Image (cartoon, rainbow, N blue to C red):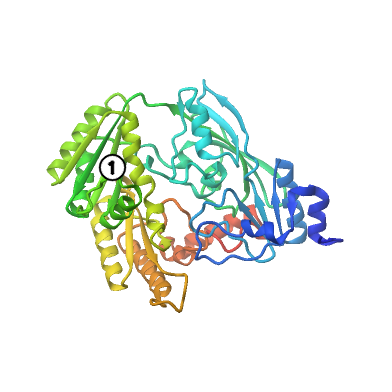
Amino acid sequence: MTVVTGGPVADLIAELGDAAVIDSDTMIAYTRDQALLCPSGLPLAVVRARTVDHVVATLKTAHRHGIPVVTRGAGTGLAGGANAVDGCIVLSTETLDRILAVDEQSRTATVEAGVINGDLATAVAARGLWYVPDPGSRAVSTIGGNLATDAGGACCAKYGVTGDHVARIKAVLADGRIIHTGAVTRKNVAGLNLTRLLVGSEGTLAVIVEATVRLRRTPVHTATVVAAFPDTVQAVDAVLAIQAVADPSLVELMDRTTIAAVNDMTRMGLDETAGALLLIQCDGDAAEAEAQRSADACRAAAATELYVSTDAAEGDALMQARRVALTALERRGSTLLDDLAVPVPRLPHMLDAITRIADRHRLLIGTFGHAADGNLHPTIVFDAADPDAADPDAADRAHRAFDEMVTRCLALGGSITGEHGVGSLKRRYLEPMIGSVERSLMSGIKAAFDPTGILNPGRAI
């Protein structure tokens, strides 16, 4: 048994009781997110906050002692943004998990930061409402984490990212003060938009503890199109053609490597000879007509196989192929997952670069993503387990390939991250993308929110 007689840990225990954890075996589970190749440190303590008062007390203690605080939701991040740093307090919001209110008239829901995205979606669906943001981690990621990274998902092209669906945020500053940003009104231009600053800030400005998010009516009709193509060039031609005649809610792409991995895992009978697969879904009253126009566009772009369904359950089953893409690739080895966004017309150039990089570095790279908004997730698969194995430099080659993909993305006018955030994984690429003056402005904003720099230091900005 560890006896603590003084200092910040003693203060935490005195303030928080069993919400403060210092047992090393328990803390290990809170030291990193899903970016397994990003470094992580050893925390001084973990706080599993059950109330906003716990968050306030934690930050006041950290501020008083000058201790870094790394905020963590469910740990599903993919950029190392929630990885512990040595001597920090890991502040977990996962048990702040209450849906506080659902207002059917204003179509809003007020939730604590630890509410699981999918749980909120299920709860409001029972009232005929729809919480739109649908990251691939929907079943396990929290609203707080989604806000911290401005998470995207398949429906982004039509409905926008998480930040487009948040009305108000309640957050705690580094010194323990509580702030409220935004308004539930549809229009609000009072002062600077602090809500948009907090969304995507990856825990560097404040700790989000509560949010009021906007809901939509659930679409009554959906229709799904699955199309196979000889290669990714024709698939992107189809995406551009679809956007000229329809407004699908999602257009998802998988390359040949990903198709094979998904088939091996699911036995869905996908065409492994295809160079690319598009999964398209349309919603609303015109869903069936838009799906047919999308299918016609695919046919004109040389689709080799085409299937259209207006059955919602069947459409959901077909979309499962895309949902399990990362899991299927992870079954083949260690993975280094990228998150790149380029203008849609430049997707063929990015996809061609990924293929060439994979060949040059003798690596398996499976690419999938959100074709309608140009957001790709090239996933490098390699053997990182044993440096003495038959392929001892695989990890080094993987990192070089990752770097080359990001560099090519920037050359194409793209973004280093479409939805996963910068974290620690991509921080070195931030200034080349945004510029030194712009980054200094971001640093100034950080200093205004967090003058002593204790919130998630060395991450995001």
Quarter occupied by the N terminus: bottom right
Q: How crowded is mark 1: few (under 14 residues within 10 Å), some or many (20 or more)?
A: many
Residue occupying the point 33% across, 69% down: 363
- Left or right of 186: which side holds 175? right
Q: Where is residue 191 in the image (x, y as percent from the top left)?
A: 56, 40
Q: Where is residue 138 in the image (x, y as percent from the top left)?
A: 47, 42
Residue occupying the point 32% across, 58% down: 366
- Left or right of 310: which side holds 201? right
- Left or right of 178: which side holds 317? left
Q: Which amino acid does label 1 sit on?
A: Leu
- Residue receiving disc 1: 279
Residue closer to the observer: 429 or 314 = 314
User: Up-down: is 71 above or below 121?
Assistant: below
User: Up-down: is 387 above or below 345?
Assistant: below
User: Up-down: is 180 above or below 402?
Assistant: above
Q: Where is residue 355 in the image (x, y as percent from the top left)?
A: 26, 64
Which residue ends up furthest to the front in the rendered image?
267
* Residue 188 appears in the rendering: no
Residue closer to the observer: 158 or 195 = 158
